[in-house]
Image (tube, grey):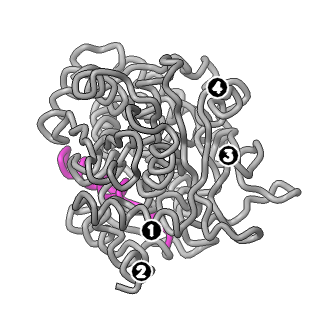
């Protein structure tokens, strides 16, 4: 297991990818962010840190996660072979643990005695709670009240792991509002608390740090494709909310010009004028949660409500690295509707016996389309970012089961 690496699109010294990223926070957080960046840089240069992270990846997370040829799903699509990078098989059930174990290891190194986190679908909250329990560090998780209702299974899991779950009843009561509350907490507790941001969003150094920790997905997937398929894929896809699973797998293929890369955002109901979460496709640049990126906003710059059947994609922004990749043209960003995701969930479940997270199902939906377009002899790689146990009630209600 190799250590976290920086991307060829790494942020500059100001934490920017071109015009995106940066640090837009209250003065009370500036010193904490400077200390965090110093600690991160020191850790990233320390072979002992890498060795311990490699041990955690193998013995706790269970890495490498499998690369899986979805043969029956491939038959259903009738085109290119469809491969799944099985992050749903990682400890706690999603890619989020790659980031939280790394950040908790850094928390211990910095001598902080408490962590806090935000969560949407609950998987980052579960992963943070599990990592905090492993290291014996108290943990508080902020979660929108609407999401605590939609993802009650994960709320229970967090509490079982010893975390305090704080429902946020302001705004849309979803991920954006949970991040707001977590930032308010951190401002007042910064001396002894580390904020474990769950995606490639927020002020520098969080987008770089989270992306580096998630890049293990792409490194493994690239090696596994060469080993199992004998070549690189024609296309790589991942769902994009904040975008950490996507950055994680994309970084393994950004330098391979022949590999097409696609991010898939949530289009909600697909009805014009109704809420969605396609910040890149339908948003414009602005500042939210400490960084500049593509956002959903009205003409006055007020943040618009987001919507997706997948709680983890229900966010009105996207990470700054994604914003740069969009403008550069290296990554194409597509959309999938709620109904597309539900259909893909059903297709994967009935063809392969795999229940995918609804977030991942958005990528599966567009992966099926691309497999048909590319045709036989091609290969499509989809990041299956998490498992769908958490979504059983939503899917059952939506499909009338």
The residue depicted at 47 percent of the width and 46 percent of the height is 372
In the rendered view, tell whether residue 293 sits above or below residue 349. Answer: above
The residue labelled by disc 2 is 399
The residue labelled by disc 1 is 342
Asked whether the viewer can see residue 138, the reply is no
The residue labelled by disc 4 is 17
Frontmost residue, 166 versus 174: 174
Q: Which of marks 3 and 1 is nearer the N terminus?
A: 3
Give the quadrant of the N terminus: top left
Percent of width and height locating residue 120: 46, 61
Q: Earlier in the sequence, mark 1 or mark 4?
A: 4
The residue labelled by disc 3 is 280
Q: Distance between the residues labelled 2 and 3?
A: 29 Å
Task: Describe the element under mark 4 as helix, strand or loop.
Answer: strand
Task: Describe the element under mark 2 as helix, strand or loop.
Answer: helix
Q: How far apart are marks 1 and 4 (CA)?
A: 34 Å
Horizontally, residue 293 falls left or right of residue 302, namely left
Q: Residues in magenta?
A: 123-144
Few, some or many residues within 10 Å of mark 4 (<14, 14–19, 20+): many
Quadrant position of residue 219: top left
């Amino acid at each position: 297991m190799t250590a976290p690496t920086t991307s060829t699109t790494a942020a500059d010294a100001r934490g920017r990818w071109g015009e995106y990223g940066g640090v837009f926070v209250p003065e009370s957080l500036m010193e904490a962010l400077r200390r965090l960046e110093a600690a991160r840089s020191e850790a990233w240069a320390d072979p002992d840190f890498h060795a311990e992270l490699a041990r955690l990846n193998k013995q706790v997370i269970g890495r490498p996660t499998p690369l899986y040829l979805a043969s029956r799903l491939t038959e259903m699509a009738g085109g290119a072979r469809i491969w799944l990078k099985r992050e749903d098989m990682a400890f706690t059930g999603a890619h989020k643990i790659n980031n939280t174990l790394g950040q908790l290891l850094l928390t211990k190194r910095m001598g902080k005695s408490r962590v806090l986190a935000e969560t949407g679908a609950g998987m980052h909250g579960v992963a943070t709670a599990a990592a905090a329990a492993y290291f014996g560090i108290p943990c508080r998780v902020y979660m929108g009240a609407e999401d605590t209702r939609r993802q009650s299974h994960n709320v229970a899991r967090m509490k079982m792991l010893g975390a305090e779950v704080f429902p946020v009843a302001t705004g849309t009561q979803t991920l954006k509002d949970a991040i707001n509350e977590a930032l308010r907490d951190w401002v007042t507790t910064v001396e002894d608390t580390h904020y474990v941001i769950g995606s490639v969003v927020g002020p520098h150094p969080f987008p770089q740090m989270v992306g580096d920790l998630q890049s293990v997905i792409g490194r493994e997937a690239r090696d596994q494709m060469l080993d199992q398929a004998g070549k690189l894929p024609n296309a790589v896809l991942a769902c994009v909310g904040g975008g950490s699973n996507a950055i994680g797998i994309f970084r393994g293929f950004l330098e391979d010009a022949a590999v097409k890369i696609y991010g898939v955002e949530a289009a909600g109901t697909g009805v014009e004028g109704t809420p969605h979460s396609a910040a890149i496709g339908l948003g414009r640049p602005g500042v939210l949660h400490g960084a500049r990126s593509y956002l959903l906003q009205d003409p006055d710059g007020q943040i618009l409500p987001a919507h997706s059947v997948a709680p983890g994609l229900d966010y009105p922004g996207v990470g700054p690295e994604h914003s740069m990749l969009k403008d550069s043209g290296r990554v194409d960003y597509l959309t999938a509707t709620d109904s597309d995701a539900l259909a893909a969930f059903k297709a994967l479940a009935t063809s392969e016996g795999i229940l995918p997270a609804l977030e991942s199902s958005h990528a599966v939906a567009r992966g099926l389309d691309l497999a048909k377009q590319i045709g036989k002899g091609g290969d499509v790689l989809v990041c299956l970012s998490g498992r769908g146990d958490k979504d059983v009630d939503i899917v059952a209600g939506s499909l009338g089961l």
